[in-house]
Amino acid sequence: MRADASVTRLAERFHMTLTGMRKHIGVLEQAQFVTTEKVGRVRTCKLGSRRFEEELAWIENYRRLWAARFDALDTVVEELKRKEKLDGRKKRE
């Protein structure tokens, strides 16, 4: 995100094949997240006109939902551990 980058450089950075990276970039280009320009044999990518605010809001909404669910699960697990510990004490007595 700091500067334009070639498809080759991006593929190397993310340990992907050129074919795989081209497919990813194609999807991002269709969504207008990136644009590409070919000069000679080098295709360069740069951020597109579309911003990520909508997607970030959607992700944040689900992040909060799952955080709340995991917190509730932690509470249930802790309660089960307490009950198990109490049951173990009762059996020894």
Image (spheres, helix red, strand yellow):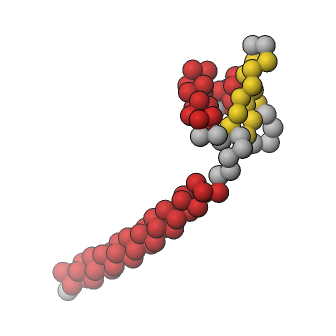
Q: Is residue 17 above or below residue 88?
A: above
Total count of labels: 0
52 is higher (above) or lower (below) than 43: below
Q: Residue 7, how many percent across, how many down?
A: 69, 25
**Residue visible at 58% across and 61% down?**
57
Residue beneath the point at 65% across and 27% down? 11
Q: Quadrant of residue 18?
A: top right
Q: Position of residue 47 (x, y in %)?
A: 73, 40
Res 30 seen here? yes
Where is residue 26, by image quadrant? top right
Front residue (pair 75, 14): 14
Q: Tell me if 77 is positioned left or right of 51 in this view.
A: left
> Residue at position x 72%, y 44% from top?
49
In this view, the residue farthest toward the top is 41
Q: What is the quadrant of the C terminus in the image? A: bottom left
Question: Is 60 or 79 nearer to us in this picture?
Answer: 60
Residue 85 in the figure: left or right of residue 29: left
29 vs 81: above or below: above
Whether residue 85 is visible? no
Q: Position of residue 36 (x, y in %)?
A: 71, 29
Q: Residue at x 40, y 74 (%)?
A: 72
* Quarter of the figure with the N terminus: top right
Horizontal arrangement in the rendering, residue 52 relative to residue 40 (left or right): left
